[in-house]
Amino acid sequence: MHVDLPEKLYYSIGEISEAFNVNASLIRFWEKEFEILKPKKNSKGTRRYSSIDIEKLQTIHHLVKEKGYTLDGAKEQLKILNKNFEVIKKLEKVKSNLINIRNEL
């Protein structure tokens, strides 16, 4: 799902719920269920979502609303995606090291 939001640092829960076409209460519920969602809150408790939060919400929305995963199933998929991401980062580091070694030869 592509979310059409203007470029800015933070978004309100209203902007997010409108972009994802879901209720704000669902977004708040997902925050409780998925520990990866931690929007910033001001002194009044107003949530502010960053672009990183938007990416996480897109993943959760895709798994739950589009793919039809249960919350537990989506949590498992997120763990798998996170592990894959960690492996990719390690492989990129190894590749960079190998390139550096090759360039020194």
Image: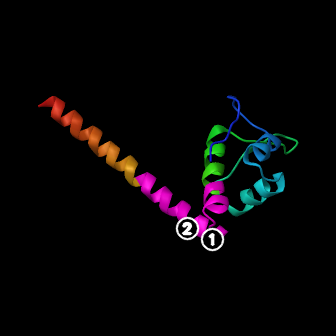
Q: Quadrant of residue 92?
A: top left
Q: Residue furthest right?
A: 44
**Where does label 1 land, which residue?**
72
Q: Quadrant of residue 26?
A: bottom right
Q: Which residues are magenta?
A: 61-86
Residue type beneath disc 1 = Asp
Q: CA distance from mark 2 to mark 1?
A: 6 Å
**Where does label 2 land, which residue?**
76
Q: Quadrant of residue 36?
A: bottom right
- Residue 55: x and y, percent? 61, 45
Residue 68, above or below 21: below
- Residue 13: x and y, percent? 80, 44
> Between 12 and 44, which is closer to the camera in this rendering?
12
SS under mark 1: helix
Residue type beneath disc 2 = Glu
Left of 80 or right of it: where is 38?
right
How would you rate the neighbour count of disc 2 (Cα within 10 Å): few for under 14, some for 14-19, many for 20 or more? few
Q: Residue at x 43, y 56 (%)?
A: 84
> Dominant secondary structure of the magenta stretch?
helix
Q: Residue at x 84, y 43 (%)?
A: 46
Which quadrant holds the C terminus? top left
> Between 38 and 28, which is closer to the camera in this rendering?
28
Left of 6 or right of it: where is 63?
left
- Residue 82: x and y, percent? 49, 56
Disc 2 vs disc 1: Cβ atoms closer than 8 Å?
yes
Q: Residue at x 70, y 30 (%)?
A: 6
Left of 87 or right of it: where is 102?
left
- Residue 73: x and y, percent? 59, 70
